[in-house]
Amino acid sequence: MTWSLDPYRCFSAQPAQRELASELHAGVKSLSLVCPHSHVDPEFLLSAARFASPTELLVQPDHYILRMLYSQGVPLEALGLPTQDGLPYEQDGRKVWQRFCERFHLFAGTPTGLWLKEELVGVFGVDKKPDSANAQALYDHLEARLGQPEYSPRALFQRFNIEVLCTTDDATDSLETHRRLQQEGLPIRPTFRPDKLLSLHNPEWPHQLARLSQVSGIPVVDFRSFLSALAQRRQHFQQRGATATDHGALHPHIERLSATELEALFAKGLGGQAEATDTARFTAHMLLEFAHMSAEDGLVMQLHIGSARNHNPALLRRFGYDIGADIPVWADWTRGLKPLLDELGNHPKLRLLLFTLDESTYSRELAPLAGHYPVLRLGPPWWFFDSVKGMERYLDRVVETAGFYNLAGFNDDTRAFASIPARHEVWRRVSCNWLAAQVGQGLMDLEEAQEAAQQLAYGLVKSAYRLGEPAVVSTAGGAR
Amino acid sequence: MTWSLDPYRCFSAQPAQRELASELHAGVKSLSLVCPHSHVDPEFLLSAARFASPTELLVQPDHYILRMLYSQGVPLEALGLPTQDGLPYEQDGRKVWQRFCERFHLFAGTPTGLWLKEELVGVFGVDKKPDSANAQALYDHLEARLGQPEYSPRALFQRFNIEVLCTTDDATDSLETHRRLQQEGLPIRPTFRPDKLLSLHNPEWPHQLARLSQVSGIPVVDFRSFLSALAQRRQHFQQRGATATDHGALHPHIERLSATELEALFAKGLGGQAEATDTARFTAHMLLEFAHMSAEDGLVMQLHIGSARNHNPALLRRFGYDIGADIPVWADWTRGLKPLLDELGNHPKLRLLLFTLDESTYSRELAPLAGHYPVLRLGPPWWFFDSVKGMERYLDRVVETAGFYNLAGFNDDTRAFASIPARHEVWRRVSCNWLAAQVGQGLMDLEEAQEAAQQLAYGLVKSAYRLGEPAVVSTAGGAR
Amino acid sequence: MTWSLDPYRCFSAQPAQRELASELHAGVKSLSLVCPHSHVDPEFLLSAARFASPTELLVQPDHYILRMLYSQGVPLEALGLPTQDGLPYEQDGRKVWQRFCERFHLFAGTPTGLWLKEELVGVFGVDKKPDSANAQALYDHLEARLGQPEYSPRALFQRFNIEVLCTTDDATDSLETHRRLQQEGLPIRPTFRPDKLLSLHNPEWPHQLARLSQVSGIPVVDFRSFLSALAQRRQHFQQRGATATDHGALHPHIERLSATELEALFAKGLGGQAEATDTARFTAHMLLEFAHMSAEDGLVMQLHIGSARNHNPALLRRFGYDIGADIPVWADWTRGLKPLLDELGNHPKLRLLLFTLDESTYSRELAPLAGHYPVLRLGPPWWFFDSVKGMERYLDRVVETAGFYNLAGFNDDTRAFASIPARHEVWRRVSCNWLAAQVGQGLMDLEEAQEAAQQLAYGLVKSAYRLGEPAVVSTAGGAR
């Protein structure tokens, strides 16, 4: 059986809805991709870079794939993930690829399966579904393609029609790669992510601070100088084209601490005495602090809430971070975010984008919040919900209360470069199908649906992330 | 493009389901409207009353409209809302109307957009979608209509085919307007809402008590006399035709307090020393007290849970209550309600209607509770969920466990008089479409669906609110 | 109107989807039933047993029926439930049947209504919907059938095509009935359910312990001997064919206690001093203990979380357990289960099946957990969610993240023997319809859908419960 892309994929089988969805999709499918939140490593876009192998491109960086295979009994070392404890791990990319293809049926019904098909068929011209028998031939096919210049990262970047790509970068990053790429004309922007600098109880924290002092040129010796150095870094990021910051926390808990308490917490961290609860308190305050900085310098603030990171301690010890062992928890946005909104909810310059892993808060809390506070916009369905049904639930639950214009469009949030167009394509198709159902049910007219399709595919994300605006120059700098 | 009402609106585009939905709808669309829970001001129904202007009728009393416009950067003062801090606010209704029409696209995909279309097209004969260009002509059109006798409140009341309208009234209301309207033959009933009398920590509380003493003729000096005065008021409401009470709380937390503690709390309130936590404790007890009163006098008890009122303190200070800054929080009904159900869950006379803003409790808690306890009925989807998809989720989640007969039909819960038929129409259409899907999927037969459509549109609400029964005469009075 | 089974029931009315669903269903409808979790009493399968009456077979053991009738004002004593407080109760099964049939309309739109129709029409050849007028004739019809040999329990067991039936049994059960049934060739297996042995504060607990000592031959005098006796029982259950254990708790709270604390708790229970909080702490530890036992002996561990049992104390006093007054509460699986997963989440032999009554955890917690940890599988939608829409929500929310192969297929979880095929039939139809929609929307191909239909109907449950594997022989015994 030939493996090919159904032109009506993600659309309803009901003929009238299918036709209308196709029509709406035809109006947006050629729009360029705006990628405001990505986790790809900018290094790979340097002109000489090549993808190393099918396994390194498609399997190993994708924690959706890793977690599914692991859940079905494949050890991560058998997938070639480097161990940190000396346990031998698979060195042969072809063997990893074989293990992956033998279990390709595990991805039936999952977004990973959908993306992989879009990539393999649409980008790499594969025409057979991976399985045990064809795995090596498929590897040969892909390896050959990756050796061709039109499959270089830079060539794919162009072919993918990416208008802008924002990476996610440590606050202490020099952004030297970004400078080089920009000089070469690539539309790459960094995003300011300071999470590691908040982790008071992490043994690595003093090193993070030392690095912060070094790159900022401001000796960080206390909380006050810490803030100054952060402000310097934000300015540096803005000069390199950043329009946004990114922040993660387990809970949307925000709390203003006194200057005294802050200095005491900071000193405790410096002395190596801080515990996880200190980090949590410090984070609760710092989110407020960063919101004030954003209100001053205009960097859009992204807040990603609800992931219990590294839930599996045995894997954390053996393989480190980001191997798929993150599990969501519930959130209380209404009360958690209130201290921030009390201070800044009506601010004319602040923009705060919210991302949740607790879908029960879409209609209960997030849509009502975004449908009221002018500083808020809702980020797209995130992580486990970046899927056909996840997107449908999101649209079902937020649009009625928040409308379209309090949404932030789509972002792909991926480390798997080759999956970028697949993810945008799924979003565009699902949202066009959803809008077609709205029209079919007489809830929106065709003109409204066409406008909404454009906004969801392109307009909202550009405006939410201030990517269509001229670069904002901070007027306040670090002078708070 | 002519703006008109799709005869199949809210129905599926799938032909068979659409036809069946139409057929079911044809059987209920002429049933009169039973409105057991409304927030319209009864004054406007006095015979000489007229609507002041399109802006005052359609925009300013509708917090759904206010919140959406505010979320997109329109200050409430620019919408003509009177400020309480001396800030100037827009006096020109035409300018407010212009701002509203310029942003009409914000309501695409929202229930507000759906209701406004039903009102403008269906009630006022508008045939163009509001926009920047036609806003003033539209204002002229509406203003002219409102000047005609057939658009007087009384005339619309008749045209809307309202069988009964229950307002929501402070426990201290004299109900004089209701008496006059009833004398003129209007089917208006009050609803007993004592929430303000529970707010021990509100600086206004002593004034509320003074008013209670005055209208009841019972000097309220302690908790015991407070209860007596409340019982007197309930009797007065029943004599004016009330069949229900209404109560709101952040959490469904119920707890019996000792007489000593109650008198102490009450004295603390009288002395101006009470705090918000005292009000919360007092409320937790009083909900139980009111349930016992309802078990005696037969007034149906409505409980609305889960709204964090006035979440935006800056707007509260400037504009006061009810301008759209209320945000839901999660609820724990199963444990919160247990003390009340332990005492009264099997009572033959009590009826308790539950309303939630936490949809996750529909299937997890509310349907199982209502599907077991004889005193319980579930209120319809409330507030943010009074929408097409909100109603679909509600029916999807409650009917399988609670059936139809543990539901309380529909209520419009609105302060926007002109939107009353629109809201009932959406409910009737959505429920008929939902039932058509049940039949199409072979889960109900046509006869069952016809019966359920009648019940959802008309029968359940009358029986749940005891509106079909002869007035209940309290046998116990205030003698507890 | 003739009452008959729609051949397309549970399938979409959309023609293409309906055809495809039918085709998928044709491929699984003849597969035998695997029933790994049942609450039927094995006694009734002894060769001479007969069903007593229609009322005793269909109405009285079904708490779904009891709770609906009770919620609409029918006292349980009027349904013939034996009272424990001397209140007279209905002795005439025909009168109970009449009351049930008069209220048959209450079950419209509920899974109970669907199952009853499948049973009455499909198993007993009824062709009229029950109502007040035909109730007695219907009773006559059913009574006559139950007197025929082909409607004996044993005959129905064969007709239902049950491949294996696992009952749920107290840990202290001798399993003598199972032995006899097995000798007669019936595929009956017990399941080890030790919950009653954990209820330290229950006045019955000492009697439970005495019984445990007696059947195990190990005098239980302290926590250490308690563990030994439990291990002995597990071995006995395995020898009788058990492949699984079953555990219920209000919360998924797990916590390792010290040996000292455990002995102290145990002694407190022995001394009759334990309270409910002691039982909760003890349970939190024992779930961990049982997981370790399962990791050793290979019994699949089922964990059912979130039911507040016996929510209605008045009914508990009068009628005892299991009369429908159990109400769900929310759950926090991610953090609650972590201590167990920290110790055993990557264990090669442990298998842990999770069941929830909090649907908000399907996508937020359970699918991410099962999609990562190799020891986990997700049980099917449970209890109130064992319904058409409950199943659809389950598949919608878990498959995208966990895939199909981390699911545990279906189980009927019923005390109502005659409803077993009806429940499996609903699951098979709903899952085939869901898969047909996946194919129609271009998200899965036909081959994948056919494979998934087989797995959901038959394959997954056999493998999840290790029913396809040769009996596991414990290698560790009670020697921990």
Image: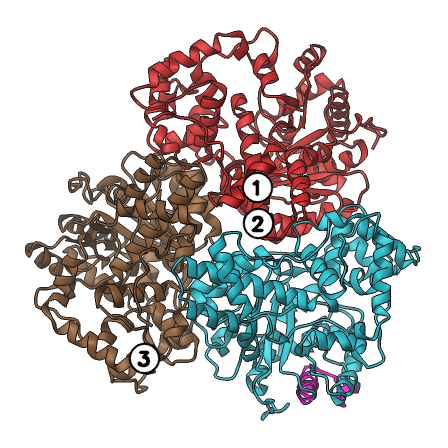
Chain colours: A red, B cyan, C brown
The residues colored magenta run B215-239
x and y percentages locating residue A352 in the rendered image: 71, 39
Whether pointer 1 and pointer 2 mark residues with C-beta atoms closer than 8 Å, the reply is yes
The quarter in which the C terminus of chain A is drawn is: top right
The quarter in which the N terminus of chain A is drawn is: top left
Q: Relative to the observer, which residue lies in front, B346 or B107?
A: B107
Q: Nearer the viewer, mark 2 or mark 3?
A: 2
User: Between marks 1 and 2, how big is the CA–CA gap?
Assistant: 8 Å
Left or right: where C388 falls relative to C155:
right
* Amino acid on which the number 3 mark rests in the picture: Leu
Residue C170 quadrant: bottom left
Return the residue at label 2. A440
Q: Nearer the viewer, mark 1 or mark 3?
A: 1
Return the residue at label 3. C79
* Amino acid on which the number 2 mark rests in the picture: Gly
User: Between marks 1 and 3, how big is the CA–CA gap?
Assistant: 54 Å
Subunit of label 2: A
Q: Is residue B355 above or below residue A154?
A: below
Task: Identify the mark nearer the N-term, 1 or 2.
Answer: 1
Q: Residue furthest front?
A: B2
- To the question of a shared chain for discs 1 and 3, the answer is no
Q: Residue at x 48, y 81 (%)?
A: B347
Identify the secondary structure beneath mark 1.
helix
Magenta residues: mostly which secondary structure? helix
From where the camera sits, is residue B252 visible? no
Return the residue at label 1. A20
x and y percentages locating residue B293 in the rendered image: 59, 83
Total marks shown come to 3
Subunit of label 1: A
Does the magenta-highlighted stretch encompass residue B229?
A: yes
Q: Residue at x 60, y 70 (%)?
A: B303
User: Between marks 2 and 3, how big is the CA–CA gap?
Assistant: 48 Å
